[in-house]
Image: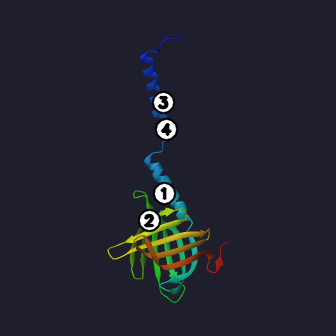
Amino acid sequence: MKGPKRIGDTLTHLLWYKVLGTIIIFLFQPNAESFGNTKQIQASKFLDRFEGYWVGEGEAGGKKIHDEMHYEWILDHRFLHMEINSLGDDTFRAEGYFWYNETQRRFEFYEFNNGQWPVRIMRGYLTRQKLILEDRTSDRHIRITLEWLENNILKLTEGYVKGQKVEPFVQEVFQRKASRGVSVS
């Protein structure tokens, strides 16, 4: 029959397991930098879907609109540059830059246009198939939602945020094109 274990043996075993556990956690736990890089990679992969040439039709303020959009990565794949030009009767033009701010853990969009608000700074987040961006100033609260309907079909909705509701004033569906006049299937 074995007698009771000595207290010293038990403490030695506990200390050994604690040291071994600490080593395993240290070796296999991702550090903050690699976690940030993972988020950056996921954000880049989401934004990669936008790259290319798009043509859209919809409505803005009760009027029909027909626009083209072009997205391309710039500055070593850090910023996604966007250009929108009207193909219809209006003269709307815009350029902007998307990026994922690792420090703030959010998407940011900086837009410059010839419309009602010539400079817009929007911040946002992802939900499944949507990128939701908001512009809040002292005189407005605007939300833009970019939603994937299919792999090559993108819906843009822009609206005023009033409490829990969004009142859309722009709704446009874009289809990816290989180049002008050529659809991508």
- Numbered disc 1: secondary structure: helix
Q: Position of residue 167 (x, y in %)?
A: 45, 77
- Label 3 sits on residue: 20
- Label 2 sits on residue: 124
Is label 2 or label 4 in front? Answer: 2
Q: CB atoms at circles 2 and 1 under 8 Å apart?
A: no
Depth check, front residue: 160 or 172: 160
Q: Earlier in the sequence, mark 3 or mark 4?
A: 3
Figure check: 107 above or below 28:
below
* Residue type (three-letter) at the residue carrying disc 3: Leu
Q: Earlier in the sequence, mark 3 or mark 1?
A: 3
Q: Earlier in the sequence, mark 3 or mark 2?
A: 3
Q: Is residue 77 visible?
A: no
Q: Earlier in the sequence, mark 2 or mark 4?
A: 4
Residue drawn 52% across and 78% down?
Answer: 171
* Residue type (three-letter) at the residue carrying disc 1: Gln
How many residues crowd mark 2 within 10 Å: few (<14), some (14–19), many (20+)? some
- Label 1 sits on residue: 40
Judge from the rendering whether residue 167 lies leftward or rightward of residue 176; answer left or right. left
Q: Earlier in the sequence, mark 1 or mark 4?
A: 4
* Residue type (three-letter) at the residue carrying disc 2: Gly
